[in-house]
Amino acid sequence: MQLTHQIRGRYLLIDAQGRLDATWADYFTDALMSHVRDGHHDLILDASGMAFLSSAGIRALLKIYKELIAVQGSFRIVGTTAFVKQTLSTSGFEIWLAEALPDDLPVEASPASAQSSEHYLLNAAATLTLSRHAAWLPWQKSDANSVQSLTFPTDTFALGIGSAAESSAMAREQFGEFLAVAGNVVYQPPAEESRPDYLMAEETYIPAVQCLQALVCRGEMAALLRFVPSDQTPFFPIAALLQMILKQSRKMMAGFVILGEIEGLVGAALIQSPGLLSTDESFSFPEVKEWLSFSGERVFAHQQVLLTGVVKDRDKNDDPLLPPLPSHPELAAHIHAAVFPYQPLPNGNIDMAASVQKFFNGPPPLAVMHLVDDNRPAVGLGQSTLIRGACWYAPVQNPEVLS
């Protein structure tokens, strides 16, 4: 099978030549899914050169159709031969068939876009109120007085170290990284090879976490940044996104939530609960490896990540909960990441709560980690980097909380 394509305005016109059968179904699916990942969500398949269509080919078409419908896209097939048309009609998929090209399809192919980001103003007056809770720092001994029980309703997002246990005593052996967004909490148990657990707001239930450390933002997002790769900008390091957030916020501190496709993450996660510390400690390498697992390489390429964090223009009053980035010392940030199996995001202005909820309603999360800026000479892994995604953000109205 031979596939060629043209971008025509908002449409991607794909010309398919040959047989769409079991031999070519995986190739066809992978090729079209790569276009969906690239943000082309209105697909037209020119099947005038498609000589044969089998049940395996129909399954491939159905997979593409479902992916597009999930992101409010469209899919139609034009120019079918009599055989392909009859195969689709008798199989119950005549809904895909169109007699002609859409009226708003441009006559000529569109030039490649050099734009790598779009901004949507949601509420110019919106701000976030930041609170700092149970501010445990490595590697301090903790007790019941160090722990605070926090609830996370839909108007908050947060990150920190905590446990979903019912009490501070039960949480002692279970403290790990967590993040919360729009009434959803995902938490990493402190054990190697453990899978994340998660809590979702349902009716009157509001997720609660026993927190050893937490930064909580409450309020409304001011803007949405959509970022997509281009020839000039094939990917987006975290620091570049943080710089855009602060520039657009026009404030010294901002909170943010990001959903994006991963190029590579660099981070760490607890493998022992800090609640087990009997005295204040000062771990160094290699002893710290008994408590923390470092990624060791850039991980989770082409999966989807949910990031929450706070960033500020660094000043002389550094707060331990907002450390400077080694590669960009003018920035200070604290970021947690929850990794999910890849799902495409709709284009344009999308709602944060609904977008996040879709991921929590899908396949379970794969990992939760604290992002690390590994700027070591020669051997460092660098920053976490994203390919495309959506970033909601707003300025923090009380930055003095972290100063």
Image (spheres, rainbow, N blue to C red):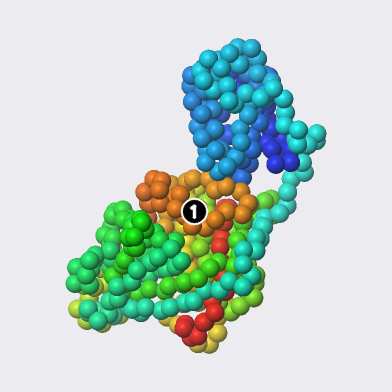
Q: Is residue 130 left or right of residue 222?
A: left
Residue at 58% from the left image edge and 34% from the top image edge: 32
Q: Is residue 218 left or right of residue 87?
A: left
Mark 1, other Cα within 10 Å: few <14 / some 14–19 / many ≥20: few
Residue at 52% from the left image edge and 74% from the top image edge: 128
Check the image and name the residue furthest to the right: 107
Residue type at numbered disc 1? Ala
Find residue 247 and report its horizontal and vertical position in percent. 65, 72
Find residue 215 and report its image quarter. bottom left
**Can residue 192 be seen by looking at this rendering?**
yes
Q: Nearer the viewer, residue 298 or 343?
A: 343
Q: Does 273 sit above or below residue 302?
A: below
Find residue 98 and report its horizontal and vertical position in percent. 66, 25
| The N terminus, quarter of image | top right
Q: Is residue 23 left or right of residue 363?
A: right
Find residue 102 and report its horizontal and vertical position in percent. 72, 32
Q: Is residue 213 left or right of residue 30?
A: left
Q: Does 103 sit above or below residue 38?
A: above
The residue wearing badge 1 is 354
Q: Nearer the viewer, residue 390 or 304?
A: 390
Q: Nearer the viewer, residue 182 or 28?
A: 182
Under tag 1, what secondary structure? helix
Find residue 288 and report its horizontal and vertical position in percent. 31, 70
**Can residue 291 be seen by looking at this rendering?**
no
Residue at 56% from the left image edge and 17% from the top image edge: 89
Q: How many marks?
A: 1
